[in-house]
Image (cartoon, rainbow, N blue to C red):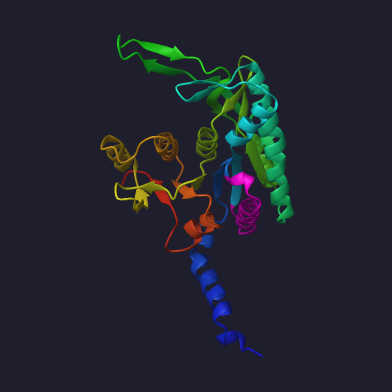
Amino acid sequence: MTDPSTDPALLAKAETLTEALPYLQRYAGKTFVVKYGGHAMGDVEKARDFAQDIVLLKACGINPVVVHGGGPQIGAMLEKLDVESKFVDGLRVTDAETAKVAEMVLSGAINKELVGWINAAGGSAVGISGKDGGFVEAVKLKRTKQDPDSNIERIIDLGFVGEPKKVDRGIIDTIGASGMIPVVAPIAAGGDGHSYNINADTMAGAVASALGAARLFLLTDVAGVLDKDGGLLTDLDPSGVQALVDDGTISGGMIPKLETCVSAVKKGVDAAVILDGRVPHAMLIEMFTDKGAGTLIRRDR
């Protein structure tokens, strides 16, 4: 029989727990807001790993709040229902019919599937949207584009696409106090009575700011922010982010993600992290080891 004190695998597990101890002590009682992307949700094993990570955070005394996306699933449902998608400058126009499908997919199928995974992992999750309990009030998103010939800006109407105007944390506090884990669909009502579809990153950033979260995690499909040589940048602040945008190192879809992170840390979130959601337990590696796993954005030093 192997002596447990000399078994390398058991020793490695014990050392991992010891390494995690100071981080567990530091974040006990804190709130983590985690944006979980639509692409990752299509993989059963990754969904199971994610759910286990969220339940572990809760068991360690951390208060996780999950905000999920669902763009690919909305697109698939629109195609299945033979609803034609319209795009302006690469952005989906959410007309009344598309808005109904988006709410059905986000607040229904995806939200309840994720709740189910967390419950199956031993947690107690409850699914809500921004409409529940007056959680999030939305306002119609306004986008403009400058005409290259006349230099006149024109308004792009994306339909029922919104952004958070106000977040009332009451329902999240109530859910958390009961020992449950909130799972939030990025749908909210506007003052005009309409339902609006909100970008999940934007929703997560607004929720994290309202809750004064210790961490905002954006799980995505890349390792994090990369330099011009493809190396991972692990520690940035708002000034550094702007410099990287100005010199072209950061471009495309990473810019709005970083804008969300910078806005959140300026509004009171301790730090935001962009992580590769395809890596098993990336969030735990980032939080509870000395190495980290993604790009951390903190306030200017």
Q: Position of residue 187 (x, y in %)?
A: 62, 29
- 83, above or below 293, in the image: above
Magenta: main secondary structure: helix
Quadrant into which the N terminus falls: bottom right
Left or right of residue 221, residue 40 in this image:
right
Can residue 179 be seen at all in this image of the molecule? no
Which region is colored magenta? 40-62
Where residue 216 appears, as percent x and y from the top left, is 50, 44
Q: Seen in the image, is 8 located left or right of residue 248?
A: right
The residue drawn where x is 69% and y is 42% is 175
**Residue 40, above or below 96:** below
**Residue depicted at 54% across the width and 61% down the height:** 24
Nearer to me, 81 or 145: 81
Residue at 54% x, 27% y is 164
Q: Is residue 8 above or below residue 48?
A: below
State the image coordinates of residue 157 (x, y, percent, origin top left): 50, 15
Residue 179 located left or right of residue 7: right
Q: Identify the residue at image location x=30%, y=43%.
A: 240
Residue 234 seen in this snapshot: yes
Q: Nearer the viewer, residue 277 or 207?
A: 277
Closer to us: 242 or 20: 242
Q: Is residue 5 magenta?
A: no
Q: Residue furthest left?
A: 247
